[in-house]
Amino acid sequence: MSTAPLSDETRSLLAQLSTATLTSQLMARGLRNTFMQGVRRLTTGGPSMVGEAFTLRYIPSREDIDVSAVFEDRNHPQRKAVETVPPGHVMVIDCRQDNRAAGAGSILVTRMMVRGAAGVVTDGGLRDSPAIAELDFPVYCAGPAAPSNITRHHAVDINVPIGCGEVPVYPGDIIVGDREGVVVIPPHLADQVARDGYEQSLMEDFVTERVMAGESIFGLYPANAEGMERFRAWRQGR
Amino acid sequence: MSTAPLSDETRSLLAQLSTATLTSQLMARGLRNTFMQGVRRLTTGGPSMVGEAFTLRYIPSREDIDVSAVFEDRNHPQRKAVETVPPGHVMVIDCRQDNRAAGAGSILVTRMMVRGAAGVVTDGGLRDSPAIAELDFPVYCAGPAAPSNITRHHAVDINVPIGCGEVPVYPGDIIVGDREGVVVIPPHLADQVARDGYEQSLMEDFVTERVMAGESIFGLYPANAEGMERFRAWRQGR
Amino acid sequence: MSTAPLSDETRSLLAQLSTATLTSQLMARGLRNTFMQGVRRLTTGGPSMVGEAFTLRYIPSREDIDVSAVFEDRNHPQRKAVETVPPGHVMVIDCRQDNRAAGAGSILVTRMMVRGAAGVVTDGGLRDSPAIAELDFPVYCAGPAAPSNITRHHAVDINVPIGCGEVPVYPGDIIVGDREGVVVIPPHLADQVARDGYEQSLMEDFVTERVMAGESIFGLYPANAEGMERFRAWRQGR
Amino acid sequence: MSTAPLSDETRSLLAQLSTATLTSQLMARGLRNTFMQGVRRLTTGGPSMVGEAFTLRYIPSREDIDVSAVFEDRNHPQRKAVETVPPGHVMVIDCRQDNRAAGAGSILVTRMMVRGAAGVVTDGGLRDSPAIAELDFPVYCAGPAAPSNITRHHAVDINVPIGCGEVPVYPGDIIVGDREGVVVIPPHLADQVARDGYEQSLMEDFVTERVMAGESIFGLYPANAEGMERFRAWRQGR
Amino acid sequence: MSTAPLSDETRSLLAQLSTATLTSQLMARGLRNTFMQGVRRLTTGGPSMVGEAFTLRYIPSREDIDVSAVFEDRNHPQRKAVETVPPGHVMVIDCRQDNRAAGAGSILVTRMMVRGAAGVVTDGGLRDSPAIAELDFPVYCAGPAAPSNITRHHAVDINVPIGCGEVPVYPGDIIVGDREGVVVIPPHLADQVARDGYEQSLMEDFVTERVMAGESIFGLYPANAEGMERFRAWRQGR
Amino acid sequence: MSTAPLSDETRSLLAQLSTATLTSQLMARGLRNTFMQGVRRLTTGGPSMVGEAFTLRYIPSREDIDVSAVFEDRNHPQRKAVETVPPGHVMVIDCRQDNRAAGAGSILVTRMMVRGAAGVVTDGGLRDSPAIAELDFPVYCAGPAAPSNITRHHAVDINVPIGCGEVPVYPGDIIVGDREGVVVIPPHLADQVARDGYEQSLMEDFVTERVMAGESIFGLYPANAEGMERFRAWRQGR
């Protein structure tokens, strides 16, 4: 299922769309399980997140293997992942939904930001969360967690298929995050989902405007023939 | 157990009281389970919420029944509920405490706001939560959830008794929400609970003032005879 | 394991350190389970929290024992604890991780603040949470909960060893809280952990500065010989 | 979606099939969520369970409404349901997956058995579970629970659509239970699912026989052309 | 609330009653939370369990304190509790509902059996569960767990009030266990609950007999005047 | 950390030891997290389980990828794993503790049994569980689950490090299962743990015998100098 790289146009469209709109588009294509459960935005600033998935997989840690000295090895998967996630990609970290320890902390997250990553997502915890929260960078996690990764997590693989927040994530999947959460889009659907999602969002802007003006949702949401006609007129008028 | 409609006086008193005060009044009347569990305020602005319950019941969805086309039917319970909740009432949505999908989104919530509903509460998710969060309207849920209701929920009934956040909710129950959460008051108790709660809140204002001034809680909280005397004096002095 | 009281120097150092740094120091000494799970900062203002633990233990409540009248007794453990927690100490309340009812409310929390306590922590709920949230005082809990303690909790013991957020807490343990959460330090380790943690935090400030400037983490985090040399130079330059 | 009553032939086929086979057949028709979660067989004896769903809905109980006296009313939904579930039907009870109290006890279950019901299923608890366990009757629940229904549950509706174990159940759905658990089949699919499921079960008997004889699963499970040929020969030979 | 010791008559009555009957009697006296949640019978043989509560309290363990050497101390609370639980008493162990490690194992349970204890209950795990399961002795737990107590639990107190399975347990409370689970009876209610429970159980035997004979529950369960009359006749006939 | 293959002597010793004894031996070597949580024996017959881990990793499934046709591919990881697990090895399946769907069913489990595997373990569900339960073969899971793996699980990797029941499992780790559950032993510790565990089990047999004879645990469990002397005498006498 190799696909062309994410086009600038699609990237730009996705950055304007909500995860609500995108899950609707994916649902219309038969994909019901695309929104990460239990994963929330940590940073209050920063743009929406759009990028290809670059993954890191953790298993539970073991006391005799997971000691601080491991980080001296440049090939330690956690550290290596941070230094190799390509610009424009989203680091997605599988912590098995265990947020009792951190998947990363502010130094590593900052390094990924500086290296040009598009964002960081984990279904585990993040440490130094108050410092991370102030970065101008999209970061998502399942909660703050001071303990370092090795207290519960052992980094084992880079860029393999993983689960994150109960959703499958394959390297190269398109990851989009807004203030609501994070959605995963198979790459071969990205262009179509972006385009149709954009149409949907225009329609919803129109409907919201009419609803704010006091109109009923009947005939508008979903739109019947007359509603569609009015939408087209509204759209042309913009 | 038919009761008179909620009086303006009681509505006004309830709007000034905290859910903490109200749960105490209900506990004093033998009702221990009146505070919705896992339900949090989503909107940062807007007033306190007071109104009679108007309910919507969901069961789990089924792939062949719950498809987008259902919303074209004006009698679809979710859409019909939104267009029929009476002004001054609170829409209470039973999502079986499953917040992996939304019970509603910003267009429907906005429509209910415009129609004059007193607020919206669900023990499921809400989608478009960033947009809803900015409405000047009381909205409560168990978390943000981008997936639309049909991915997990099937709207089945309007205005029947339901559970919400582990609390029983009968149509017409008085629903009150503050920044802490949501409490459910049987209608025949509303007047009394409002009046006694108001007395309790005055007493607690007095105690808080004295505690801030450095006094011990002994004799004040709860008040002994002398404490009651001082409270009455303080009250008259206001 | 009697220890000297917490020195001003250690107290002052701990107030500057993050719980992330402190859990690392404790992990290095073989203690993996020191960060309270599910406990979050409620107050947005106020300083970091540092103080010796003073504990309150709850068991589940029973309808015939736990009635409002109990609070008239000055020896009721909850009220007595509030009036006896020593200045500079942190009140740590074991609610068995049940946040469906409150361990305390704003009047009691305010009283502890006025009495000079260093903070309040519970793995249960807190009521009047909107009022508490505005205090200039470190307060942590597992969530807002309007129902009063007696609906689910029975205060039974003062200053005995307890669990809080899955962490053991002995009276006199050093409790430190920042915006991330709360860590528990055995008192005999406090001086050493504070001093070594301070060194660690300087190193991490240096690394963060270099990472923001575009450097790789390799050689810096952890630092190799050259990295240590550069750190020492940076440190002298401050 | 009105359908003919369950035919004797289909009922008889379904009684021979496993829930594993039936979920596969439903999955092949696009239905992924048909197996009740957390619901286990309580009775060790008795046949498989097959019958149309007759439902009972509970909401959370309220102390002032749910008192023992309610059972004196012959129209109390729990008691009325027990006396009206038609012979050959399965009583399905929605307890909101809360097994801290019972949905029913041995007297009511026995009454349903004597009246000719095809079985009882709840996602709540059952009381007198040791007595029920010895009945020659299919009974399923989420665990033993001594407290009577009114401690947590309020019976509110008979024969409306419900959720049970996270699965939607409509009155008239075909409920099948074996030693593994309970599956829900939309009635319009029952004949087809029964017939195709029977074919599948024959094939699996053949495969199991070959696997026990030492053959590889490749070519057999799933069967390729040669495997199908051998299956047909085996089948004719029976 | 000091009470006379459990009389032989009451002990004997309680041993014949089910926990379902006993929770009903306690519910009728305003106590809704008396059945331990998540606690199941481990031993398949042995009698019903009746006895006064003797308690053991655990908090979470700490790596530097909870090492095997602690058991050399004869005053270690776990070992001391095992050697001091009085004959006829039930050992109730508070493991904070954490069954990831054991509260005790077969040697300690066997010692308590030999010493004449009436049973053992914990809301944590038990190790050597296959060996324990074969003892002729009432034992209840939240599941098998091979890891020894010190991996997660630290024994801290003997015979203080505790929680077990979400129920408050005071030393001296009457603990009754059957094949369904465990109920906690305040001692001052034991005689009355036993006597009234016995009456209730007779009535239920009568009703069960009638239901098995094909009668409706209406008029019998609950019994109206005629039903009561028939019950009295039945009773005399026995 | 390559190690010699599991010797016959160690395999034979481990087969006689309980998981309780083995977790104690591992705890003494600093490993606290070695017992799989939530994983129970499914088969009532069959021997203890001892063997090297051969692993299968699942991630969440996706509707467009995980369709029945995938099993026609001989390289599908689930089917390939079943046909390649070496004799004497234990198949360990990581289902992310999600038992709502099966990791395998009776045909695949039977094939592994026939091929000489030492057992099957998963922290997910198993389908056809009644049929599996009757095999003379060690099988462990987190519960019965009729839905096939593709409803929730996607097989992705063979023989990589995984988590199972919250425990890390590396290919080649020694997996031991008894009626209590499953423990994971790092291979370089297996010989030592087996030998010391055997000594421990003898001592516990001796202590159990003395306890059954009415002796106190003091001086025996743990044994003091005199207790050790008596143990040595007892041992020689066997």
Image (tube, coloured by chain):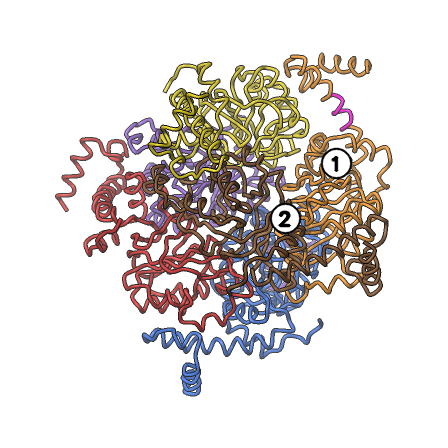
Chain colours: A blue, B red, C purple, D brown, E yellow, F orange
Q: Chain of mark 2?
A: F
Does residue C197 appear left or right of residue F154 in this picture? left
Does residue C219 appear left or right of residue C93 in this picture? right
Do the residues under discs 2 and 1 have CB atoms within 8 angstroms? Answer: no
Quadrant of the rendered structure where residue D8 is? Answer: bottom right
Residues rendered magenta in the picture: F197-203
Write the residue at 60% across / 77% down. Answer: A191
Give, as a three-letter code, the residue at label 1.
Gly
Whether residue C55 appears in this view of the structure is no
Q: Which mark is residue F45?
A: 1
Whether residue E221 appears in magenta in the rendering, the answer is: no
Give the prevailing secondary structure in the magenta stretch: helix
Frontmost residue, C37 versus B126:
B126
Q: Which residue is mark 2?
A: F97
Whether residue B149 appears in this view of the structure is yes
Q: Is residue C225 above or below residue F137?
A: below
| Circle 2 or circle 1, nearest the eye | 1
Quadrant of the rendered structure where residue B56 is? Answer: bottom left
Frontmost residue, D224 versus B21:
D224
Give coordinates of residue F186: x percent, y percent: 76, 40
Q: Element under label 2?
A: loop
Q: Is residue A29 above or below residue A147?
A: below
Q: Chain of mark 1?
A: F
Whether residue F198 appears in magenta in the rendering, the answer is: yes
Does residue A81 appear left or right of residue C13 in this picture? right
Give coordinates of residue C97: x percent, y percent: 47, 40
Q: Element under label 1?
A: loop
Give coordinates of residue B82: x percent, y percent: 37, 66
